[in-house]
Amino acid sequence: MFIPCYLLHSRHHIFYFRWPIPPVLHPRRQRSHLKLSLGTREPREALRLSRHLAYHADKINWKMAHGMDYIEFLRHLKSYFKSILSKHIELIDKNGPLTLEAINAVQNTHDFLQQAIKDGEDDYMPCESIDEDIYRFLKARQLDIPQDSTTYRQLKNDFKLPFLSYCREVLAYNTGIRNYDLSGTTQSTQPATIEKTLKQAMDDFIEERKRGEAWTARTLKDRKAQLRLLSDMLGANINIAAVDALKAAEVKKTLQVLPKNRNKNPKTRDLSLKDMATVTGIGKMDTRTVNEYLTVYQSFFGWAEQQGYVQKNVFEGLQIKVGKHKAKARMPFTREQIKKILSALADHTPKKSGKSFRYWGVMLAIYTGARLNEIAQLALDDIQKDNGVWYFNITDEGDDDKKRLKNAS
């Protein structure tokens, strides 16, 4: 049975729950841990209790650090900007379209906000601080958040996104109200989009993910290749706003006929996408791989929608439905297979091979069930002792900022 890293086993065989406390909640800004006895020796019961505690501990950590639930935090921001947007629209309805000076002011704010989000800057105007806008927000929502608090820093980081959306909606409404197209039965007020080529949008998307360290080096390489394929299918210089549902469906159809390992196989690597699809005798990309590509494109167009580059995420929900019975179950090694692996290790002991990682890496994998990268990034400091019991502390903490975990458990 899998035992998550927040479960400890004492020398008395009692299970303990161990949870990291963020440095921001420590009086001296140090890393610390909470340790709590679960009062049971039964692994399944301990696992059930620890999962429940981990869920609530995570929510408590956020609330203590920020003074409110994150969803409550978002509601305040959304309500505020919806309110001032409604007032702005009422003024346009009453007084007519914005003057050229007012349009330029909103457009400049929009552009500065967009650049600040891309560059990860706190302030968005060259000579003004975003603190003034946040002050008006706090006053309107009757919130008291000190500027030196974690909540304020989070607010400063998140404030620009709904502000950008507000500017975009004001410009779109102002443009739509003067639409005198009489070809339809009703006046069209479709929101405008910001012109970007597919390649420009992709470059912005990748750069933002790199800046936010959202991807590992391996993921970055994969995402670039997946987005490059989309660019090859649609054309790098196409206006991203021109990618509609029909084009998205065509992308999905093309993915399903492309051969697997198309860039490595000598029969396909030098061919165009159209010619690749006609090569026989080579297996096609499996459904799981096709869905992975579609998920990446859905994420990219979802981001593009937030930036105002497209009106709708046309890749939303395009993944192929796969029945549960189709999934390939991963079966554990049998006892005979484990014995065979252990027997083969006899030729790779540190003394015989001179490469101890070949021996200990496999031994740790067999006896801990840890993932390969979790074993490879273990340091001497991660071998710890608690109440006379030695254990491996598999964590993303340490001097090496490249250490990573797949998930919190």
Image (cartoon, grey):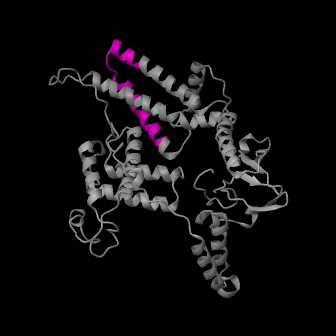
| Residue 345 position (above or below residue 242) | below
Closer to us: 250 or 210: 250
Give percent across and percent down for residue 1: 64, 57
**Identity of the residue drawn at 45% across and 33% down:** 164
Closer to us: 388 or 200: 388
Give percent across and percent down for residue 52: 66, 41
| Residue 272 position (above or below residue 287) | below
Residue 98 colored magenta? Answer: yes
Closer to us: 130 or 383: 383
| Residue 178 position (above or below residue 235) | above
**Identity of the residue drawn at 64% across and 58% down:** 401
Residue 30 seen in render: no
Closer to us: 63 or 336: 336
Q: Quadrant of residue 224?
A: bottom left
Dominant secondary structure of the residues highlighted in magenta in the image: helix
**Identity of the residue drawn at 68% across and 56% down:** 397
Q: Residue furthest left?
A: 183
Disc tally is 0
**Relative horizontal placement of residue 31, taking residue 117 as reference (left or right):** right
Q: Quadrant of residue 221?
A: bottom left
**Relative horizontal placement of residue 222, taking residue 123 as reference (left or right):** left
Give percent across and percent down for residue 155: 59, 33
**Span colored in magenta:** 88-116
Q: Residue furthest top?
A: 94
Give percent across and percent down for residue 349: 68, 82
Q: Residue furthest bottom?
A: 352
**Relative horizontal placement of residue 98, taking residue 219 as reference (left or right):** left
Residue 118 colored magenta? Answer: no
Residue 88 seen in render: yes
**Identity of the residue drawn at 55% across and 25% down:** 76
